[in-house]
Every structure is written in C-alpha cells, then in structure tokens.
Image (tube, helix red, strand yellow):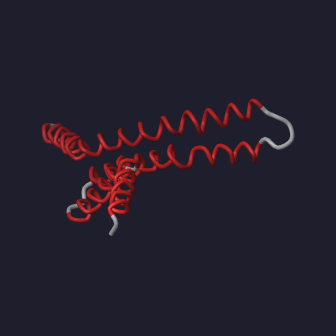
Amino acid sequence: MAPDTKQNLFYTIYFLLLHNAEAIFYLSAVILFTLLALYKPTRGKVITMWGFLILLFAFEYNKHILEPLTLQFMNSLITERPSFRIEYTINLILVKLVPTGLPIIGWCLVVLGFFFDKILKYIKIRFLDRKTLN
C-alpha cells in the first residue's frame, strides 16, 4: 500500500471516530447495559439503558435530523403565504425544546437507573419496617 494511501486511511478512520465519539460512547453504553440486563435483569439497568438510548437519539437528532425535519415541516405547513406563528412554533418545538429536553431526560434516566434499585430497596425496607412495627 502506498504511503499516502496509508495516511489517508488513517486520517479517515481518525476523523470518523472523532466525529462520532459521543455516539460511539452512547452505543457502547447501550450494548453494555443490555448485556448486563440480559445477564442479571434489574429495573435500574433497563432504565439506564433507555437513558443511553435517548442520549444516542438526541445526538443523532442534533447532528442529522434537526435541519431536514425543520425544513420539511416548514415546507409542509407554510405553503402560499408566510406564517410567522407557525414558523415560531416549529422553531420553538423542533429547534429549542426537543434538543434541550432529550439530553435532560436521557441523563435523568441514567442517574435514576444507577440509583433506582437502591432507592427501591430502601423504600421496601422502610415500608416493611413500618408494617412490622404496627
């Protein structure tokens, strides 16, 4: 293989990994928690897996889905005359709320998933202690 081809191949792989590092991390976490949930299922592992799935979707939404989806909605809903109210609503929902809300929901599920089993166990112990005292 020619040296320039080796260098170009190296740079292609490097920039591919650099561009998708966050998505690769989220996908690895989804695979890891799926395997862990298959090995020893708990509610916390499933919630954490869903959190990483939402984070992966949020990453892909921001990188690849946001602009075409916004344009599609604009072209579909605003046909003959301009409507600033529709444009504002589309931008508010698709450009501001969804890209902000998805990562918040994803990270909340990840954090909740890590502590869910401990919280559930604590609640059960507290509930059972009260029940046995009465």
Q: What's the residue at 64%, 34% (across, down)?
A: 91
Up-down relation of residue 70 to residue 53 (above or below): above
> In the image as oriented, which residue stretches furthest toward the bottom?
1
Q: What's the residue at 21%, 65% (across, down)?
A: 39
Q: Position of residue 129 (x, y in %)?
A: 14, 39
Up-down relation of residue 94 to residue 30 (above or below): above
**Side of 50 where 117 appears, left or right:** left
Tally the marks: 0
50, 125: nearer the viewer: 50
Q: Position of residue 47 (x, y in %)?
A: 33, 50
**Figure quadrant of residue 8:** bottom left
Quadrant in the picture for the N terminus: bottom left
Q: Position of residue 117 (x, y in %)?
A: 22, 47
Up-down relation of residue 61 to residue 91 (above or below): below
Does residue 50 show up?
no
Q: What's the residue at 26%, 60% (across, down)?
A: 37
10, 89: nearer the viewer: 10
**Side of 41 where 4 appears, left or right:** right
> In the image as oriented, which residue stretches furthest toward the right?
80
Q: What's the residue at 18%, 40% (across, down)?
A: 122
**Side of 43 where 67 appears, left or right:** right
Does residue 99 show up?
yes
Quadrant in the picture for the C terminus: top left
**Figure quadrant of residue 97:** top right
**Figure quadrant of residue 7:** bottom left
Q: Position of residue 18 (x, y in %)?
A: 36, 48
